[in-house]
Amino acid sequence: MACLWPRKLTLIAVLSLAPTTVAMAADQFTPVLVTTLNRATGAFLGTDGKQHVVYELMLSNANPTPAVIQKIEVLEASRPAHVVAAYQGSILQSQLRTLGKTPVENADIEFNGARVFLVQLEFPQGAFIPQRLLHRITLLGGPVPAPTPQTPVTLQYTVAPLEVTKKVLVVGPPLKGRGWVAFNGCCGIGGSHRSASQTVNGGLYFGQRFAIDWMRLDDKGQLLNGDAANVHSYAAYGADVVAVADGKVVAILDKLNDQTAGTLPDMSSITLETIDGNHVILDIGGGAFAFYAHLQHGSIDVSVGDHVKRGQVLGKLGNSGNTSAPHLHFHIMDGLSTLGSNGLPYVIDSFDFEGEVSAAKYHSSPNLDGSWNENMLPTPSRRRDQFPMDFAIINFLVQ
């Protein structure tokens, strides 16, 4: 009975008020639905000296008239006249993906079709970053909700709010020692992780938004010294993998042998369970989970339920699962499922930045032979609370 009293009191108060008029924006027909895959994201500082905001838009055409996306603008919500970024033409097309994560041939969206638009915003270090973004879409599409295709007209509307916070996770390093190179990292459109969406458990997820494949340079600047098919020829093989924060072990897999290096395994032999190889997942609190993949069989030193401390050895770097060379795949995600979760931005609290591997050389090289340390700094640069960007060479300072 007590729970009825607030309802009765509220009703009396409402009835005693004079009628008021609430101003509402006029409805607008929006044939292409536009939503963000996540309601919020975080801005982080990279080793390139820029602040980065990374997310995706989902575009779906709900009208029988085929749509053509002409322009996508990112706006500051508190000042909609301020355009943060604008995409059109070939740039817009290059950032569109099918739901199957493949590039598109044009910016058309058929009836009942859907596309994903990849967004990477960059701001100078220290620059103001809006706390809330909106998105203005310009397109050719169906003018009315008719059951049959109509002559397309130009439409424009502002939709899809996104919250941006400058508070991201701060963690320690996932490895020890010198010469670690961040491959397949943030945030290039062509990177293997950036557009690697997965349709899992009834949803579309970007678990690998901020994933890095860590490989190591030896004293001669080589990733590989010897037979490319032999895992022991790689400088990274067998390195200790460590906890980036205090946490609890919530999942492990430790039953797969190393793949032969130098080539990817037959995909018919890979399953959702084995694609990441032997791995460890840590619950590091606040809804964040640290994921370590491709570990050596028999090397994992922890069990599910164990509580670990930052810097504690979890296992050794290997070449199990879907991998062509020994490396540590590491990312942080918002759920326990490695494929059915979304990647979270983070920064590492302290490390030394030594330079960068040449991206042009890496993309043009047929293999990993040779020296990769041509672009080293004369003296390593101490960095704090930064994210290692693609091709960065890092010395990890493990406490």
Image (cartoon, rainbow, N blue to C red):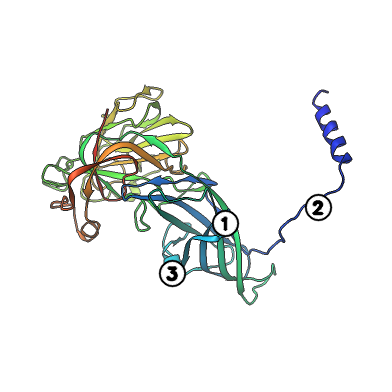
Dot 1 falls on a residue whose secondary structure is strand
- The quarter holding residue 159 reads bottom right
Quadrant of the image containing the C terminus: top left
Q: Residue 266: x, y in percent? A: 30, 50
At label 3, which amino acid type do we have?
A: Glu
Of the pair 113 and 388, the residue shown nearer to us: 388
Q: What residue did someone put label 1 on? A: 79
Q: Residue 56: x, y in percent? A: 48, 54
Disc 1 packing (10 Å; few <14; some 14–19; many ≥20): few
Ranked by sequence position, the earlier of labels 3 and 1 is 1
Dot 3 falls on a residue whose secondary structure is loop
Q: What residue did someone put label 2 on? A: 21
Can residue 360 be seen here? Answer: yes
Q: Residue at x 85, y 36 (%)?
A: 13
At label 2, which amino acid type do we have?
A: Thr
Dot 2 falls on a residue whose secondary structure is loop
Q: Residue 199: x, y in percent? A: 48, 49
Compared to residue 337, the image places residue 392 above or below, namely below
Find the distance from the CA under tag 2 to the CA under tag 1: 25 Å
At label 1, which amino acid type do we have?
A: Arg
Q: What residue did someone put label 3 on? A: 105
**Badge nearest the viewer, 3 or 2:** 2
Which residue is at the far bottom?
A: 151
Residue 198: numbered disc: none
